Image (tube, grey):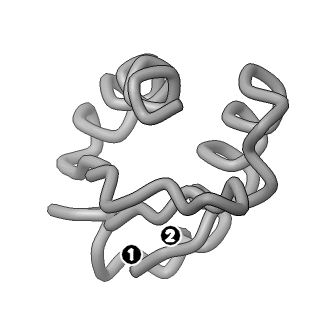
Amino acid sequence: MREKVEAVLDKIRPMLQSDGGDVELVDVTDSGIVQVRLTGACKGCPMSQMTLKNGIERLLLKEIPEVKGVEPV
């Protein structure tokens, strides 16, 4: 499943990179939780929680049914 998650994150990366940030996949747990780390400008951005939930999590849940949620680490 890790490869599927990376493929979806690759779709999101250009948007994040255009604002000076990025997302790094840390782990995918056995229970379907994707752990990510926002980097660059995204790391300290006040909108990072919205990016995480409304952008990254929404797309992962839509494209990979096995994913149950996304957590920042």
Q: Name the image quarter holding residue 17.
A: top left
Q: Quadrant location of the C terminus?
A: bottom left
Apparent side of residue 22 relative to residue 58 in the rendered image (left or right): left
**Rendered residue at 71%/62% (across/down):** 31
The image shows residue 41 at horizontal and vertical percentages of 22, 63
Q: Disc 1 on helix, strand or loop?
A: loop
Q: Is residue 71 above or below residue 22?
A: below
Q: Is residue 68 above or below residue 71?
A: above
Q: Name the image quarter holding residue 39.
A: bottom left
Q: Disc 2 on helix, strand or loop?
A: helix
The image shows residue 2 at horizontal and vertical percentages of 43, 35
Q: CA distance from mark 1 to mark 2?
A: 5 Å
Q: Pointer 1 and pointer 2: residues touching (CB < 8 Å)?
A: yes
The image shows residue 53 at horizontal and vertical percentages of 71, 60
Disc marking residue 16: none
The image shows residue 33 at horizontal and vertical percentages of 65, 61
**Rendered residue at 15%/62% (across/down):** 40
**Rendered residue at 32%/64% (across/down):** 38
Relative to the observer, which residue lies in front, 69 or 38? 69
Callout 2 crowding tier (Cα within 10 Å): few <14, some 14–19, many ≥20: some
Q: Is residue 63 above or below residue 37?
A: above
Callout 1 crowding tier (Cα within 10 Å): few <14, some 14–19, many ≥20: some
Disc marking residue 48: 2
Query: Mark 2 is on which residue type?
Result: Ser
Query: Mark 1 is on which residue type?
Result: Cys
Relative to the observer, which residue lies in front, 65 or 11? 65
Residue projecting furthest to the front: 30
Disc marking residue 45: 1
Apparent side of residue 41 relative to residue 51 in the rendered image (left or right): left
Q: Is residue 14 above or below residue 59?
A: above
Relative to the observer, which residue lies in front, 40 or 29? 29
